[in-house]
Image: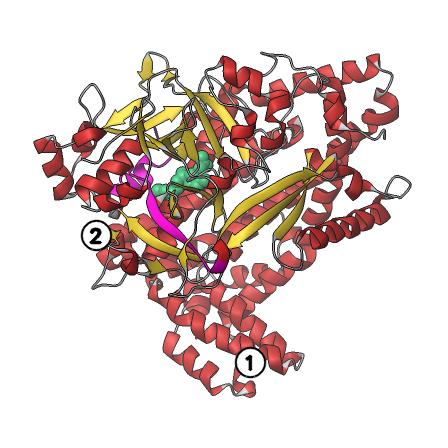
Amino acid sequence: MRRLKLSILFIFFVIGSLSAKEGMWIPLLLEKYNLAEMQEMGFELTAQDIYDVNNGSMKDAIVVFGGGCTGEMISPEGLLITNHHCGYRQIQSHSSVENDYLTNGFWAMSREEELPNPGLTVRFLEYMEDVTDEVLEGTEVLETEEREKKIRENTSRLERSASERGKYMTQVKPLFYGNQYYLYVYKVYRDVRLVGAPPSAIGKFGGDTDNWIWPRHTGDFSLFRVYAGENNEPADYSPDNVPFQPKKFFPISLDGVQEGDFTMVFGNPGSTMQYIPSHEVDIIQNQRDPDRIAIRDKKLEILNQAMESDPKVRIQYSAKHASISNAWKKWQGEILGLERLDAINKKLAFEAAFKEWAEANRTWESEYQQVFENFDALYFLYKDFIKASDYYSEIVLRGVEIFQVASRVNNIIKNIESKQDKRLESELKGTLDFLPRFFKDYHHPVDEQLFETLIPLLSNDLKSEFLPEYLNDVLAKNDRDKLVRKVYQKSVLTDEQKLKQILEEGDEKKLLKLRKDPVLELYNRLNFHYEANIKPVVDALNSRINQKMKIYMAGIILMKEGEPLYPDANLTLRVAYGKVEGYEPRDGVKYKHYTTLAGIMEKDNPEIYDYNVPERLKELFHSKDYGRYADSEGYLPVCFAASNHTTGGNSGSPIVNAKGHLIGVNFDRCWEGTMSDIMYDPEQSRNIAIDIRYALFLIDKFAGAGYLLDEMELVREKVEVADE
Ligand code: ARG
Ligand code: ASP
């Protein structure tokens, strides 16, 4: 393969070659690829205003929040805004029956009242750098395995040296399937405190019913503050820490949004698959999504019924329900979108054009023909194995709840068997910590039903080679009813007290006896089969496919020479730009670009949990006490839609106007457009943001925490707004 230096390939910039709005672009390369187009669309700033390593720029106001969201600085004193659903775990962890912040909201009325969150970190990007040459150094002559090894060595050397002895967190990540490598260097802050969150009836308004749906009325935001130790540097939590002073924070616009306004989303999109071949689109659209939807249909049916009939179960299962239903709903939108776009045929057409291009260049036979033959063979195998993998993942790894306990007990047993005393001790302790957390949100009848319903799916739907003999025996011996009685109900794992006692006693003989527990045994056989016969094959196939993708991707880059391409998302800082705009979801229907408080009142229904509007919000609606947060037309804005290319991880991302002022906080996409992870549609792919004026209104008028606005920079037509 010819070595590629992408940067010199893209000297030409062809406006209009890609849809104006598609793409998650690398901040370092905006000047080269995007700035002209952004300015044409209305952007008034420079590339250095967005990303600059020498001066404070927008990138210095943005963080990776926790494990996979985005957050941004909105004051010189470390105040941070992100989504309610991104801070949910923290809000929940401070909640108790007496202080139920999830239900009632939480507002620190002074710095002293801000709540620390052990384990929560935010990281700021210091700089990013193209390290392709360094990563590939000395690999040219090597064959596959040696090559990978050398790449790993080079990568860790680079990461180690850039970390400056642990001062920074560093990552080298492949772009374009390893045709390029980038180094990312972060500073990680560890003292991040909860400042404010609206009640769930606002922050999660519409719940799973409205999730992924436009028009939307969710006040999906929460506030945190980053604290620093001496010299503004990261430090563990201490009451002596002081608010962190960011190099840059976002001024907040009170001007609102108009249809057609330029918008930019700057955040950390997690993962996309823009360049996969038709084979994989086919598998996702016609197998993986439908399989996983069908399994989750069953899970949700069980959860819904139980949650509706018992308020306690409602609370126990609300977070689980949200997480099961989130992807379940997205996949449904994804299938529809892929069908509507005729995505497989579009990919096939692209592949035909690719072949033609390669033939014209006399490289088809020498370089790419084999890649596509390999794709045929690899995806043929992959199809069956990924089906099995999806089933095990949905049913064994995160379906039947008690299997989580089984997995832990299993580790304990393994450590006894292999006489790993140290590890055994920590496993025992870890499991004893885990049990109360697990059983707090566990309702026996729900899990029993999950077990009864999900286990037979494995044998019904998978080829026998993907199942352990043991499962067939168990199922042959027992009908559905007996399966529950003979396996689930016979297990001691579901009995918190008994299990706790055995673990606390720590008697190895008694612990080893658990090997005969019917749930543990079933879990064990299933898990063993998965680890031995399915997972390694899936991993190997993925790795082979990626090697081929690297060659194909290099070809695409050559073929598209002169056109800017963007790499798949990889949870690093990217810029997406577009416009404030609604869309036409189907024939005869046109969606506006914004929603208002009146829409929340339309949905109000105390009978429906997701639509139970808080009294205080109703009062404010009736008195029309919107202050300076109302739109010039008099309504109170709630959310707006725009055509920025975003994905999971972009939640909490700032959405800014042409002047770089914050106009909203991104939190979702519309359902008709969720196939944008695979194929973006300028007509229907929309991101959804909370209008920043709604957040300010809630902080000020609803919560009475207006003092927080004093530290923000609120702007209207570039003129500072005096305090009211
Ligand atoms: N769909 C959004 C995202 O993927 C929001 C999810 C949280 N909200 C919910 N109702 N489950 O993260
Ligand atoms: N809701 C997603 C998130 O949490 C955003 C998206 O998928 O559009 O990142």
Asked if disc 2 is less than 8 Å from ligand 1, the answer is: no
Foreground of the two, 234 or 122: 234
**Crowd band around label 2 with a 10 angstrom C-alpha radius: few (<14), some (14–19), many (20+):** some
Residue 104 badge = 2
Residue drawn at 88 percent across, 39 percent down:
140
Residue drawn at 59 percent across, 38 percent down:
53
Residue matched to label 1: 425
Q: Position of residue 13 (x, y in %)?
A: 65, 15
Amino acid beneath label 1:
Glu
For residue 128, above or below residue 278: below
Residue drawn at 53 percent across, 66 percent down:
407
* Image-quadrant location for residue 439: bottom left
Q: SS of the residue at dot 2? A: helix
* Image-quadrant location for residue 139: top right
Residue drawn at 55 percent across, 69 percent down:
521
Which mark's residue is nearer the viewer, 1 or 2?
2
Foreground of the two, 119 or 718: 718
Instruction: Work out how far the residue at label 1 is from the one at label 2, CA to CA, in angstroms.
Output: 40 Å
* Image-quadrant location for residue 370: top right
Amino acid beneath label 2:
Asn
Residue 651 badge = none
Residue at the extreme right of the image, as rendered? 141
Foreground of the two, 72 or 529: 72
Q: Is residue 17 visible?
A: yes
Q: Position of residue 487 (x, y in %)?
A: 46, 68
Foreground of the two, 344 or 564: 564
Q: Which residues are magenta?
A: 202-230
Q: Is residue 19 visible?
A: no
Q: Quadrant of the N terminus?
A: top right
